[in-house]
Image: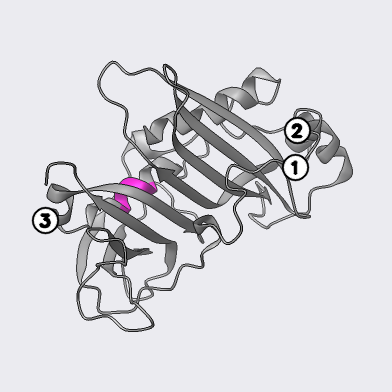
Amino acid sequence: MLDGLEVGGNHAQSVGFSTDGFATTPTMRKLHLIWVTARMHIEIYRYPAWSDVVEIETWCQSEGRIGTRRDWIIKDYATGEVIGRATSKWVMMNQDTRRLQKVNDEVREEYLVFCPREPRLSFPEENNRSLKKILKLEDPAQHSRLGLMPRRADLDMNQHVNNVAYIGWVLESMPQEVIDTHELQTITLDYRRECQQDDVVDSLTSVEPVDGKTNGSALSPAEGSLNFLHLLRLAGEQGLEINRGRTEWRKKLGR
């Protein structure tokens, strides 16, 4: 179901943006500019069953001076029920210098023509969870999976790790007893550093503290719901942070 969010790339290509996976406009390509993900938030209310047909609506719009955003709404095609929502923030980067760059008026005009005329959010609710700050996971982590390495299928056209691979790495350090009894309900990822094909990554997971404290229990006020913090970092002495995450898990039906 998470792979279905790649329909955003299909949408970008269908309106004439590049087919290289970066959804760049003509001016962006001329100036060697690309979009990179800064934050991703996904909420899944119900997983589709085998043979279910889903409908995915996606759109992009401006977000500040150096970025844009893309939102998704996922529905059960037969009933119209919303079974998932997602939002993401992207920033513009110079492909050569790897430095962030402001969105100039020419680039903005090229993509705004395909955006809603009025601001539209997949999470319009005030103080919704997509806005929640992710606390940094402190050492020592309660669970870990060390020495992860990118596969060829994990790399984009620029030989950097793609967004879906990061989600998989985060889940690698989840305790098996949670995977067996719960299903992923919400995931939020903050992307802080690029990961390349020769990098080695450590995945760390701990229970999310409640009111600044943790006693080893991940239980949230919603009975049966579990909350965790995650950290992906480069292996080695420096341990540079790649990705910071937060997940919520609900008990599987019948468990």
Q: Nearer the viewer, residue 79 or 231?
A: 79
Q: Is residue 169 magenta?
A: yes
SS under mark 1: loop
What amino acid type is highlighted by mark number 1? Pro
Q: Residue at x 45, y 44 (%)?
A: 163
What amino acid type is highlighted by mark number 3? Glu
Local packing at callout 3 (Cα closer than 10 Å; few below 14, some 14-19, many 20+) is few
Residue at image mark 1: 119
What distance separates the C-alpha of mark 1 from that of mark 3? 42 Å
Name the side, left or right, on which 154 lies relative to 85: left
What amino acid type is highlighted by mark number 2? Pro
Residue 26: percent from the left, percent from the top? 77, 29
What distance separates the C-alpha of mark 2 from that of mark 3? 44 Å
Question: Can see residue 161?
Answer: no
Magenta segment, principal secondary structure?
helix
Name the side, left or right, on which 109 lies relative to 38: right
Q: Are marks 1 and 3 in contact (CB under 8 Å)?
A: no
- The magenta region covers 166-170
- Residue 41, placed above or below residue 233: above
Local packing at callout 1 (Cα closer than 10 Å; few below 14, some 14-19, many 20+) is few
Residue 28: percent from the left, percent from the top? 75, 37
Local packing at callout 2 (Cα closer than 10 Å; few below 14, some 14-19, many 20+) is few
Residue at image mark 2: 116
Residue 145: percent from the left, percent from the top? 21, 60
Residue at image mark 3: 177
Where, by quadrant of the figure, is residue 137 drawn? bottom left
